[in-house]
Image (spheres, coloured by chain):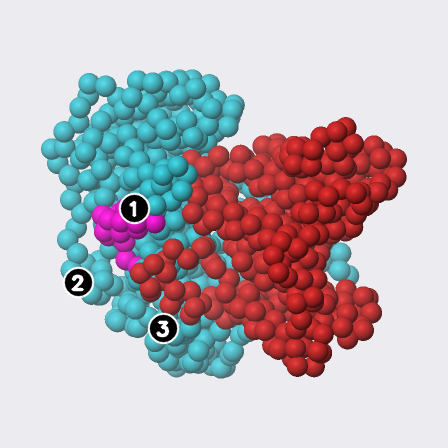
Amino acid sequence: MNEVQTLAAKPWGRLYSVPKLNLGQAGGLLLVLIVLCGVMSIMTPNFATGLNATNLMRGAAVTIVLSVGMTLVLLTAGIDLSIGAILAAGGVVYFDLGMLGAPGPLALLGALGAGVVLGSFNGYLIGRVGMSFFVVTLGTASLYRGAVLLWTDNQTKDAYGDGFARSIGDSILVGIVPTPFVIAIAVLLIAAIALRYTIWGRSVYATGGNREAAEFSGIDTGWIIMSVYAVSGLCAALAGVMVIGRSTIVLPSAGMGIELQVAAAVLLGGAALSGGAGSVWGTLLGVVFLEVLRNVLNFAGVSSFWQLLLTGAILLCAVFLDRIREKRRSGSDF
Amino acid sequence: MQTLALEVRDLSKSYSGVHALKGVSLTLRPGEVLGLVGENGSGKSTMLKVIAGRVEPSAGEIIVEGVPRRFRSSAEGLAGGIALAAQEVIVHKKLSVAENLMMGAFPTSGGFLREREMYARATEMLEQLKLPIDPRTKLGELSLQYQQLIGVAKMVARKSKVLLLDEPTSSLAPEDMKRLHDTVRRLSSEGIAIMYITHRMEEYFAIADSFLVLRDGEAISRGKMSETTPDRLVADMVGRELRPEHRQAGRSVSHASPVLEIKGLSVAPKLKDISLKVHRGEVVGIAGLAGAGRSTLLRAAFGAQAGGWTGKIEVDGQALRGTGISEAIEAGVAYVPEDRKRAGLVMQQSVRENLTLTAMRKVSRGGFFSARAERETVSELARTIRLRCSSVEMPVSSLSGGNQQKVVLGKWLLRNPRILLLDEPTRGVDVGARTEIYEQVRSMVGKGMGVLMASSDLPEMLALCDRILVMSKGQIVGQMDAAEADEEKITALAFQAGSR
């Protein structure tokens, strides 16, 4: 809370006040992250190396792209459970267009278009028809995944020779920085700018914060909700192509269960499940934190079961601490 | 000497350094009705919440019937004999009236609900309050007014030693208010001590025995109701003398072309064949009892009644096609809803963001906000509406009720509306802010805007309106010039038609 007030006191600091910038939770996370990295750098000689940094960035890229879309959806008080399925669908569309002779960039556009269509369908049912986000995205997750499995007959395809996919999903752009990470940060920046400086962004916060009041102020909240799911679909399809580049195969079961990991990272970053509060910067911190944790545990030779367990425990702790702080601050009635 | 029902000593409460209560003491005899008087933000509601155990005090003692108590939750408070009907009524809209009334005290045997007994007891309670409601109705189907009454009735039923009522009448029509007053008197005669908060001064004089005035968390004065006057109380509340509101005389109403004309509007089953006109520079009031259809009428005129209506709504001669809210806003309609927290404000957003929400295009270019234009527009707007807050970057939830209401009204100023629809514009708003809101509405009207307003506060209607329509059961049953109207006439008309 104090940080927010000092920021607002500076003349241009007010530009940086998004609705309820949750520095509390994300700030604590940042501190833990820095301490974790510091300790690891001293204890493990292989941690603070260019190679490990590259691995970390490469690993985080896909999750960042997905979590940007998920953050938008969470801001409108929803969750998109279908991103894993759309990721797979995007990958398949990209690969099949390539098989038909489309050049890489065109195939990518086709995949992104498919992502937007699938996402918009979610958004239409949720924003316009008024169905529950949970039911809709649970349903389409199964629907889209089933369609992908039927279409591909669950055949894994080899994409080793796909240079374009590898360049956006795996290659090094400059020095130790992989291209996918640069793409992910670009997506994040666009979302950050859109959220903070555009009418659309403000409308997303308002719709999530209080849909009725937003509607009564003349905002077409149905359209806003449709748009965030469309963007979420777009992000998922982009992630789908990046995954092909990284893994060099087209897997119909790609991204299975990834929606929950992504949701965990976004919530860890301070977005409120009730909508209207959160930012993509908090989300970035959440993703990076979980990625570093995984990396650290790998170095320590800890089993991946422990990683799963720790991720859950940390998420619960973070939200719990935030809840306590919130209660202290507002002197809540409950 | 008789044991005191409640004694409070040096009660203090601070929220992260801000003092909401500063060492307030009071005593309450059994059967005494104490009016807690003060502006919004003076600490009245906090006081009640602390006594009831809903909020923990920072310091001080609470003594119930001679025994020092420290409640850690509302449930403990209830068990200790203190019942609080809070300002924000907590109800379960999907459950029945009876279930709401019995919540937390269901009649059971061996863990199983005794449904028949529950409904029988609920029926009895409703009869005592003379409420014509079937206890099996889902609460969400009742009007906001009745929901509030049920929320209060639930606490009344708890047979506590001390009953704390925080604005139990804020959305009630006069008749429902009288029923509640009767109940308060009955409970008092049964020896229950009552602390009462309201924003209608006349209520304190109608039911309270004594008063305690709070200002900025401190007790300013205490005494018998019979030994004070409304002016004295108001002076203590605000710390300065307030002039009474004057009806604005000699306003120029142009009767040439109506700015809003409604012809034969029906919304089954709530509205039947409503026709009315509001002219440029005119304030038209709609009076009526709870459930008369006033809010439905305003919502329909704002385009918020999705489908299901027939008739014609014209703004400045142009008929609305009925495609929704955006169309009405574009045509120049503005709407201040009855429930600002639910429909008026995005509570966690800043004052600035709320103020520009209706006119984001005016402070942006090509979809991108111009930070400077927005800042300048908002600071000018904040001055115009006399907003009192430390920074427009504060979340709007941190403002007092009165200042929140100024934001709900102020966010329409940027659009220069032709017609303003007001639903209970000063509900839960303190005296000072109320006057400022009236002045704002008058100044907008002076520039040629028309106003259609609904209010349960008749003095407010008489102070603001040029013409008053009386509604009953979804129809307009009468109309009078404000100059000829008084509270008795309006009330008589509303009731006569209602009982027919």
Q: How many marks?
A: 3
- Which residue is rendered at x = 45% and y = 55% of the image? A19
- Disc 3 versus disc 2: nearer the observer: 3
Q: Quadrant of the N terminus of chain A?
A: bottom left
Q: Quadrant of the C terminus of chain A?
A: bottom right
Question: Does mark 3 fall on the same chain as mark 1?
Answer: yes
* Structural distance between the alpha carbons of marks 3 and 2: 22 Å
Question: Does mark 2 fall on the same chain as mark 1?
Answer: yes
Name the secondary structure under disc 3.
strand
Q: Are marks 3 and 2 in contact (CB under 8 Å)?
A: no
* Structural distance between the alpha carbons of marks 1 and 2: 37 Å
Residue B428 against residue B332 in the figure, above or below: below
Three-letter code, disc 3: His
- Give the mark nearer the N terminus: 1 vs 3: 3
Q: Chain of mark 1?
A: B
Q: Which residues are magenta?
A: B371-389
Name the secondary structure under disc 2.
loop
- Which residue is rendered at x = 59% and y = 62% of the image? A285
Residue highlighted by disc 2: B240
Q: Colour of chain B?
A: cyan
Residue highlighted by disc 3: B19
Residue highlighted by disc 1: B373
Three-letter code, disc 2: Arg
* Structural distance between the alpha carbons of marks 1 and 3: 36 Å
Q: Colour of chain A?
A: red
Q: How far across and how far down the image is residue A319, in percent?
A: 61, 65
Which label is found at residue A255? none
